Amino acid sequence: MLGLQKSFGATRALKNVELEVAPGEVHALIGENGAGKSTLMKILSGAYTPDAGRIELDGQPFVPENPLHARRRGIAMIYQELNLAPHLSVEENILLGEEPRRLGWINRARRREMARAALAELRHENIPLDARVSGRPIAEQQIVEIARALLSEPKVLIMDEPTSSLTDVDTENLFAVIGRLRQRGVSIVYISHFLEECQRICDRYTVLRDGETVGAGEMATASLDEIIRRMVGREIKEIYPRHPRQLGEPLLELKGLAGRGKPRSVNLTLRAGEILGVAGLIGAGRTETLRACFGLDRVESGDVFIYSRQQRRCTPGRSLAEGIGLLSENRKEEGLMLNRTLADNLTITRYAPLARFGLISARRQRCAALDWMQRLNVRAAGPEQPIGELSGGNQQKVALGRLLHHDARILLLDEPTRGIDVGSKSEIYRLMGQLAAQGKAIIFVSSYLPELMGVCDSIGVMCRGVLSEVRPASGWTEHSIISAAIGSTACPA
């Protein structure tokens, strides 16, 4: 890709970007949210048309007409924002557009066999093929997206944040697949904000900042500090900043909490000023626990105490009124209104500070939105921009900003750093620490163990719907967390 340029109105997304990937190479494409990574890859995959520049594939000029044309030429893309047909089954999504035919009819037996084989390569044969994909957890949806891309046997595979919702075990399975693809000569463009992953599996790297190429080189000789400096244009002194805080009275207590299916049994006490981390594998029940606490899922048994008062019936409205905020892992379906403005999304749960004589003040709403945009470093044209036009990482910041604007005292954060660059992650960790120092309480669900170890005061591990003993973060290692998550320790059969 040579001299690529792309503008959206007055916004220049790409400025003379260059990228070269060899056969059998895993090439890291690195940059902050809004740096132009996804735009560049959407040009390669045929979703966007460049304003200038050229592309060569196998040494020949290549002009992708649309995503189907690019796919047929051997270019497959795994999008950060999942690109599935929600009303179709897992099996139908994996083979969508690639259905095997026999005498003009879809060969359903062969389709099922191919879908099962694609999931088996990722070691997820347990995902039900007939289940509607919209009803599966976001992490399983990501597995389906990866399986679909692998099925086409691409020459060039673009992976945009493929592990953002995956646990360590599933990430290792994916890395094994990448190794096999590399041996077959497949060129892989790997986009990730987990720089340790890039350092581990990538051969070379290219860094984008503000739509321009600002660095490239061999990954083996690069230091993470140098890459981060090129990414953000500044030095990040501390990835996991710590703030002095003291634990106070219990704000949330769960005793034997069980839902419909999952969780099976959760016992925990969350105190004022505490960040409590929850680890576990896909489907362990982490997300379901937060949803039950907030009132989105039904509580079948057990007790929920908020501010030492037992809650007889949890609903989202009552939870919001009690000062509880939930950040969903699925921002597209549950977290944001993609057709509304950034300001609307930030302020919708708390209009009181913005109202005057019973009417919302547009000026106050704009000022509040601008304040949160600045504090969270949200890259957008302004508060009036539709949030659906923002990058995935900036959408995540807005979803978190709404909880902060709501002034929630108990924050239930489900994968809050998913799809966010290292500079923004550090800002969110700092913000979480500040909130805890103010006496707020946070449950932090994450599949990325280093951030749990670096940010949390205490950690519990979920396995098959049961939360193991919650103990200080210093009492865990990454190895012991994984052992508990897979059921070899501290987990019932």
Image (cartoon, rainbow, N blue to C red):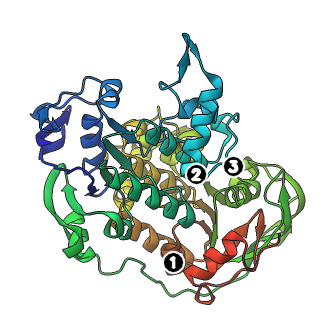
Q: Amino acid at mark 3?
A: Asn
User: CB of mark 1 within 8 Å of CB of mark 2?
Assistant: no
The residue at the point 77 percent across, 49 percent down is 297
10 Å crowding of disc 2: few (<14), some (14-19), many (20+):
many
Q: Which mark is residue 455?
A: 1
Mark with earlier residue (1, 2): 2
Vertical side of 452 occupied by 130: above or below: above
The answer to whether 468 appears left or right of 120 in the picture is right
Q: Secondary structure at mark 3?
A: loop
The answer to whether 325 appears left or right of 121 in the picture is right
Residue at which label 3 appears: 126
Vertical side of 303 occupied by 112: above or below: above
Q: CA distance from mark 3 to mark 1?
A: 33 Å
Q: Nearer the viewer, residue 108 or 220?
A: 108
User: CB of mark 3 within 8 Å of CB of mark 2?
Assistant: no
Residue at which label 2 appears: 139
Q: Secondary structure at mark 1?
A: helix
Nearest-to-viewer mark from 3 and 1:
3
10 Å crowding of disc 3: few (<14), some (14-19), many (20+):
few
The residue at the point 51 percent across, 43 percent down is 147
Q: CA distance from mark 3 to mark 2?
A: 13 Å
Q: Give residue 43's position: percent from left, percent from top.
A: 25, 35
Q: Give residue 94's position: percent from left, percent from top.
A: 54, 35
Q: Give residue 131's position: percent from left, percent from top.
A: 70, 36
The image quarter in which residue 204 lies: bottom left
